[in-house]
Every structure is written in C-alpha cells, then in structure tokens.
Image (cartoon, coloured by chain):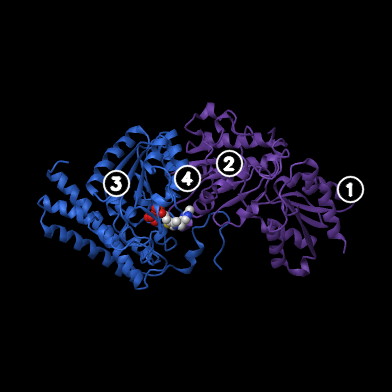
Amino acid sequence: MNAGGDNRARLLALYGTMCRIRAFEETALAAHRAGEIPGPLHVSIGQEGVAAGVCLNLRPDDRITSNHRGHGHALAKGAGVAGMMEELLGRAGGHCRGKGGSMHIADFSVGMLGANGVVAGGIPIAVGAAQGLRLLGSDAIVCCFFGDGAINRGPFLEGLNWAALYRLPVLFVCEDNGVAAFTRAESVTAGPGVAARAEALGVPAVPVDGNDALAVDAAAARLVAEVRGGGGPRLLHATTFRLMGHTSTDPAAWREVGEVEAARAEEPILRLRAHLLEQGVAPRTLDAIEGDARAEMSQARAAALAAPWPDAAVAWEDVQDSGAVEAA
Amino acid sequence: MAEVTLVEAARLAALQEMRRDPRVWVLGEDVARGGLFGQYRGFIEEFGAARIVSTPISESTIMGAGLGAALVGTRPIIEMRIFDFVMCAMDELVNQIAKIRYMFGGQARPAVVVRMPHGMWRNSAAQHSQMLESWFAHLPGVVVAVPATPADTAGLLVSAIRSDDPVLFFDPKNLFPLKGEVGEAIEPIPFGEARRMREGTDLTIVTWSAMVPAVEEAALTLAARGISADVLDLRTLWPWDERAVLASVARTGRLLVAHEAVTVAGFGAEVVSRVVERLGPARLRRAARLGQPRVPVPFAPVLEDALKPDAAKVVAAAEALLRD
Ligand SMILES: Cc1ncc(C[n+]2csc(CCOP(=O)(O)OP(=O)(O)O)c2C)c(N)n1
C-alpha cells in the first residue's frame, strides 16, 4: 500500500469503523447488564477487522447478508446507529420496529439484508440476491458473512456450488474465529477446512489474517474487483478470535486459562493503532476517533432508552397483506 | 374461451405473467425442459436461461435463493417439483420467507410463489403423495392456495404472481389432466373467496384441492337420493372464506368438511371450530370431517384406495350427518 494522503484517510476510516463497532458492542453489553436490553446479544468484539476491512470495499448499492453476530457487519455497511440501538432495546424507532432485536438486525436502506438467527441461513439468500441483481442488469455484488460453524451445514455446499455454477457476483466471507458457539471448530470439522471446500466447489479462496485489518482491506479490494468484474464468486477465509463468550450471558469459562489474554495482544484495533502510530499519526488523533465513537454510542444508548416503546398494535402489523389478522 | 387441461391452464397463467412482467422468473429442477409436468413447456425458448433457471437438486437454495432474489426486487416462481421435497427447504420457507417481512419490521416483501404439486398421484407412495397444507395454514406470513379446477388454478396463479405476499401454491397434481375453460386473458382471482359448486339446503359440504371432483360426484349421488348439498370449494385456506361457509351453515345447520389430507389436525378442524365458535350449537346441529386416516400413504393401489377419501365415503358421511 502506498503511504500517501489517500491511504492515510483510508486507514483512519478503517480505524474509525472498527472503533465504532467496538464502542457499539461494549455499550450494548453495558446496556444489557443494566437490564435495558432484553434477550441475548452475540457480540463480535475482537473480530471487527473483518467486517470493517471487507465493507470498506463495498458500494452503497452492494448488498450483504449476515449471521447471528451481525452488529459489526451492519455498522460497517452503514446501518444507522440510532435505529440499531433502538432495535436492541426493543423500541418503536428500531430498524425493525422492535420486532427483530439484535439477532435480526437489518437495514435495507443501506443494502444490509439482514442478520440471521439460523446458522448458514444467509447463504442461499445471498446467492439469490446476486442472481436477482444480475437479472435486473445491476453490477452490484453481494457479500455473504458467516462463521466457521456454517460450513458444516448443507446450505454452504449448496450455495457455493450454485454461485460457482451460475458465476454469480458473490463474495463469501468466512469469519473463522475457531469456535462454533462453545465448540472448537476443529473438533467438528473434518478435512482441511473452508478454503479447500470452497476450491473443491469451484470457488477460489483466499486466506487472510482477519485481525490485520489492512490485509483484510487489501484482500477484499482484490476479490471485490474480481467478483464485480464478472469473475464469479470468491471466498475470503479470515481467521480471527472472538474475545467474548458466545452470548452476552456466557462468561466463556470454557476457554483455556490465558487463552483470551494472549489473544488480546493480537486484537485488530490495537494492531491497526500500532501501525498508525508507526506511520506517524498522532496518538491524540486516534484517541479522538475512539472517544467520538464512544460518545456516539452512549448518546445512542441514552436516546434509545428515552425512546418510546412500540404501540401494542404494531405486533399485528407487517405479517401479510392477504389474510392479515386484526388486532385483538 | 378455450378448453384446456389444468396443467395447461397453469402454464398459460405463468406464461401470461412472464410476458407481462420481466421481473418474473422461474427457478427449480428441470424447469428448462418444461418442468416435471410440462407446466413450463416452451418457456426456455421464449424467456431464455436467465429467467428459466434449471437448478441443481438443492432445495434449500432453490427456496432461499428465490427469497434473496425477491429481496432485491425480482418476483421468482420457486418450483419445488413435488410438494414432499419442501421438507428439504423448511428453514428457508418457515424461518426465512414467512418471517422476513415481520421480523424486519416491514422493510422487505418476500414476493415469491412457491409451487408445490401435492397429493396422491399414480401410486407414488409415502414420500410423493402427502397433503400437508394444514401445516402451512398454521404458519403466519404466507398465503395458502389450493385450487382444483383449470380456471381457478390459472386465476389464482396470476394473483399469486402479482401478490407481494409469499404464496404457497399447491398444484393439485392428480387433477392435472382435468379439463375446463380458461379465458383468453386470465383474470386474477382474489384470495379468500370460495367458489360455490352447487346450491343446496340440507347440508353444507366444504372441500378443496384433490377432493373437489369426488365431492362433485358425491353431490350428484346425494341429489339423486333427494339430499340437497350446498357445496363450497374454498380455493385458498389462508385467507379462507369464513363468511361464505358461515352463511351456508347458518341455512343448512349441517357441515361436512372433506379433504384428502389426514383428518387429525387437518384444516377441516379449523373450519369446524370456527363455525362452532361463530354459530354456536343452536345453528350448527351436526358437523363432521372426512379425510385420510392418520397413516402414511401406502403404495399398492388396493391399499391406497382403502385410505383415500372418495365420492362413496363423502356420500356415506353426508347421509350419516342427516340421520338424527
Ligand atoms: C441451524 C442452527 N443450528 C444451531 C444454532 C445455534 N447456534 C447459534 S450460533 C451457533 C454457533 C455458530 O458458530 P459460528 O458460525 O462459527 O459463529 P460464532 O458463533 O462462532 O461466531 C450455534 C450452534 C443456530 N442458530 N442455527
């Protein structure tokens, strides 16, 4: 990468997105502990480099599909923070009017076609969205995020085969944090893993250190160009580490002693910060970015807390046009 | 008006809509060769491989890709080949398609048609003969269409393709050769309007899909025996024409619901319950359901016939309802 002014702006944008994801999720965890957020949260703390690095290369009209750990993907794609925070708190102004919650965050206005409560559920949707976009004559692409756990479900095989068969504009991104919920990925995954599986289905795969946001950005830039250029689907295999438990109520006591502490030294925000300092960026510039992110998120939390609950009648709405039932 | 088979009527309806709206396309196994039953015959020549997509045997992705394509503004017809294979795509149908509009607070309209030819047909046994339409009537978020005539199949398919709701379209595969009139321009038939097959005063018979011809025949036999049946083909199970059924039963006081599906927890149970709730015992004197016993569909014709509700069983059930 060149070290010119454009590049510095790009790195700062990347850093800013990662800080915003981190701040959003830390704020959400605090709100959850305070009883403001009902239901579980799946946070991606430690994995921000993947969402930020990939989405930096997407256009507003590109689409993404996500999984149960989707806050970062949504934010990186440009989803509105106020609507996300209100959704987590179940408020009327949430992107989903309080009917989705953390696990079903979606913001169609920025091409975020939804988180998904079903592991691998976003894969068929992503390939179909790509097929639909092609039919409409668009050159937008679809980026499909999923975890290492998803590669053991049938839709992974079906979806990659399908995307390769029709040469669809899909970038598959496997966020490999080495665990599926509480289970070590290698203890449930036979063979050489996701990249080999993708290659066997005719989808070229590229490995990347997902905690190196610069590397993710560079790899994604190349793959997005290939996908948009009509080269067919690609898979980015990003290895990373989930610093928190599976859900907001999992203290991750099942981790080995020292495992998380060791991983902290390698987490993506620290690494990008170190790189930026090396490049001569002033510490206070970076501190300001972090501070702004935290302020933005605590302001969103306060606003959401003050926002109205949905009217009970909303529970009856958005079901279907024909045969909709009336509010009791 | 032309006299065509039911499967041809369905073909003409899809053809008309694909010509009308370039966002409509078809995905499913073997659709480029016309589909298993010829319901897409000639489509590949007219619309090409971008809109007539023969897919791998990947039901999850046929269903899920249809959804994804709807989310970006196209209007897919998802062909399941035979109803029973939808079991391989239940997550995509039940957790995704049926939920997405609600769960995302109305941001998305999954405007898909899922075509699932169902019912007993050519002794295909337990995995190719099921009628589980009641499962889907139970599922919020979808329309359930169960037509039984060429005209209704065509008109309801047009509505289904134009609908912004996901429509589960149960093609009655045993009735595919049945002939009937279909208009030059196929008009949409609204969901939730029953078709009165016959007017009568002694009892109400409610039916749909594959049972319709059997009930028609039974009504003739009953008439010859001096029993006048008021017969309704529901045509869609969600929404369903509660008003027409209530009006009829309010006059006859007796209700028989006949469907090919298993009786236990079938949609007949919903129809009877609703009528009981709305009319009460004073106006609903007797009610009965007729369907298959709660066993899988067997292979041998003698075994299949033993279980299959037919005209004779409808006549017997109707006569029993009148004995009191
Ligand atoms: C089909 C399905 N099975 C099981 C679950 C329960 N579940 C939720 S997340 C999860 C682990 C997923 O692992 P991975 O995709 O690697 O993501 P991670 O949670 O590790 O980030 C499981 C088993 C589910 N949501 N969907």
Label 1 resides on the chain identified as B
Quarter occupied by residue B72: top left
Comes first in the chain, label 3 or label 4: 3
Give me the residue at 34% from left, 57% from top. A71
Q: CA distance from mark 1 to mark 2?
A: 42 Å
Q: Element under label 4?
A: helix
On residue A155, the disc is 4
Task: Give the number of the mark in front: 3 or 4.
Answer: 4
Label 4 resides on the chain identified as A
Q: Residues within 10 Å of mark 4 (few under 14, many from 20)?
A: many
Q: Quadrant of the N terminus of chain A?
A: top left
**Which residue is under mark 3?**
A54
Q: Are marks 2 and 3 in contact (CB under 8 Å)?
A: no
**Which residue is under mark 1?**
B224
Relative to A27, is A106 above or below? above
Residue A184: x %, y % from top left: 39, 54
Spot the purple chain and give its letter. Answer: B
Q: Are marks 1 and 2 in contact (CB under 8 Å)?
A: no
Q: CA distance from mark 2 to mark 3?
A: 35 Å
Residue B130: x %, y % from top left: 67, 47
